[in-house]
Amino acid sequence: MSEEVDQSRRHFLGVATGVTAGVGAVFAAVPFVAYWKPSARAQALGAPVEVDISKLESGAMVKVEWRGKPVWVLHRTNRMIDNVNWAEPKLRDPDSEQPQQPDYARNDFRSIRPEILVMVGSCTHLGCAPIDRFDVGPADLGASWEGGFYCPCHGSKFDLSGRVFQGVPAPLNLLVPPHRYIDDSVILIGSDSGAA
């Protein structure tokens, strides 16, 4: 009879020890798993960003940050819209065949609406920040320059739709991030579900 008691005690102690070890392992693992979870700041950096364009004047550009990258929202003038294809014969990818933009922005304007351009302001060569050069015929860019973006780091040039010129270090057009219009005056950058 004492052997039966010892067996049941042993079984009970074995199960109790196993359960206790399992619970202890879970409690010990929680801080390690939580360590790998992105911080609230990191999660916010990846979250979509709303941009109010209601007061963005024609010819003006606003810069915001999305996922740690500069994003430009340019309200193109009528002249810019009319001249969007001025450099087409000089462009490396004039038809935007490389996947640097969502399908809905794969057009001459590389945008949902011709007057509003949304793109990442980071050169596709080494990530420098191109500068806006909307002036026509400046001495340093030549008399045929009709406006666009110029990267001062290594001389890459982009047209008014962010398409890269031939013969410059940048290999690709500037990136157009996913975006959509929430209404006529607010753009949501980072989300394109229901793009309109």
Image (tube, rainbow, N blue to C red):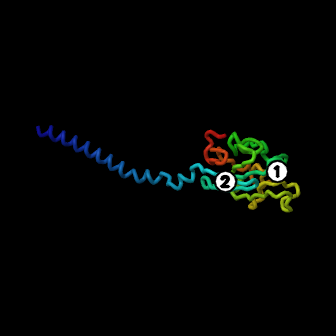
Which residue is rendered at x = 72% and y = 49% of the image?
117
Q: Foreground: 91 or 187?
A: 187
Residue 127, horizontal then vertical, whole percent: 68, 56
Residue 22 badge: none
Identified by mark 1, the residue type is: Arg
Query: Quadrant location of residue 155?
Result: bottom right
Q: Residues within 10 Å of mark 1 (few under 14, many from 20)?
A: few
Name, please, the residue furthest toward the left. Answer: 1
Tags 1 and 2 touching, CB below 8 Å:
no
Q: Quadrant of the C terminus?
A: top right
Secondary structure of residue under mark 2: strand
Which residue is rendered at x = 67% and y = 51% of the image?
54
Identified by mark 2, the residue type is: Val
Q: Earlier in the sequence, mark 1 or mark 2?
A: 2
Mark 1 vs mark 2: in front: 1
Residue 77, horizontal then vertical, whole percent: 78, 51
Name, please, the residue furthest toward the right. Answer: 143
Residue for badge 1: 79
Q: Residues within 10 Å of mark 2 (few under 14, many from 20)?
A: many
Q: Is residue 112 above or below residue 40?
A: above
- Give the spatial CA distance, label 1 vs label 2: 23 Å
Q: Quadrant of the N terminus?
A: top left
Which residue is rendered at x = 60% and y = 53% of the image?
67
Residue for badge 2: 71
Residue 43, horizontal then vertical, whole percent: 53, 52
Q: Foreground: 125 or 72?
A: 72
Decide if residue 72 is on the left or right side of residue 81: left
Q: Foreground: 97 or 12?
A: 97
Residue 143, horizontal then vertical, whole percent: 88, 57
Which residue is rendered at x = 61% and y = 47% of the image?
190
Secondary structure of residue under mark 1: helix
